[in-house]
Amino acid sequence: MADKVWFITGTSRGFGREWAIAALERGDRVAATARDTATLDDLVAKYGDALLPITLDVTDRAADFEAVKTAHEHFGRLDIVVNNAGYGQFGFIEELSEAEARDQIETNVFGALWITQAALPYLRAQRSGHIIQVSSIGGISAFQNVGIYNASKFALEGFSQALAQEVESFGIRVTLVEPGGFDTDWAGPSAKHATRLPDYEEIHEAAELARAERLGKRGDPEASARAILKVVDAPEPPLRVFFGAQPLQVAKADYEQRIKTWEEWQPVAELAQG
């Protein structure tokens, strides 16, 4: 379909901004949300009425519903809804404050949930649409120092897989995009860091070395925009798709170990069956 209408959260930088530009460049229209829409002024100047900037904090459920309604009323339809807003909370599990843990879940899980719920009535009514949930390799495997971030992405993965089954008969598709390390500010200005406990200091250093080795060469956010267009234009889009070269090997190693352990302990599983 030509001239698709996108609703993208978190468009001030990173994936959200690059994907909005890619959509606009090919003639699509975009409702772009950001906490500070001044970051979108250059895009408004360039693309004019094709871009609708909306100020939004995704943790505000009422504002989420109002933002989606505004976008639908403005453009007359919604074709692609991208839940991209989120951030990385660093810190070992014991180091996290209650506020840090809750804020991570509020943004990465509930923010995506509220936008999804807000969009679904419009997508059901038109019997079409595509929801893109920006997850992570951290939603497939877990790594020290980002445990609460892992928890948020595992939750996103879970409700999105269930959602895909619930809305398929309405012509709505769901895709979880699972990036590896990309050259964005996810671990920079966007990230938050818990206060370190002295006992973990050496383990923190080892974790940072392991993370650097795991990430290797970072992906190009601009190239990811070309990839997302392939996904949204696919006749049968996938439920899950990795972005970047590294995630597949990480996931294969993790799942091979899980299956090995499950098989070794199957006699205990059967004992529990009774």
Image (tube, rainbow, N blue to C red):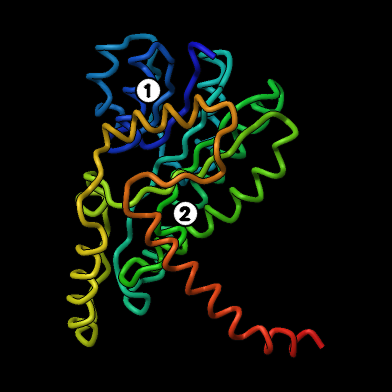
Q: Which residue is mark 2?
A: 106
Q: Nearer the viewer, residue 170 or 88?
A: 170
Please state, as top left, top right, bottom left or bottom right, where the C terminus lies in the image: bottom right
Residue at horizontal 49 percent and vertical 28 percent from the top = 232
Residue at horizontal 65 percent and vertical 27 percent from the top = 123
Relative side of 196 to 25, left or right: left
Residue 228's spot in the image, x, y percent?
A: 41, 32
Q: Which residue is mark 1?
A: 53
Please tell me whether residue 273 is drawn above or below residue 90 in the rendered image: below
- Disc 2 crowd rating (10 Å Cα; few below 14, some 14-19, many 20+) is some
Between the residue at mark 2 and the residue at mark 1, the CA separation in whole angstroms equals: 22 Å
Relative side of 161 to 181, left or right: right
Residue 50's spot in the image, x, y percent?
A: 39, 12
Please tell me whether residue 54 is drawn above or below residue 158 in the rendered image: above
Q: Quadrant of residue 8?
A: top left
Three-letter residue code for mark 1: Pro
Residue at horizontal 47 percent and vertical 54 percent from the top = 106
Residue at horizontal 65 percent and vertical 24 percent from the top = 128
Q: Quadrant of residue 99?
A: bottom left
Please tell me whether residue 42 is drawn above or below residue 174 in the rendered image: above
Under circle 2, the secondary element is helix
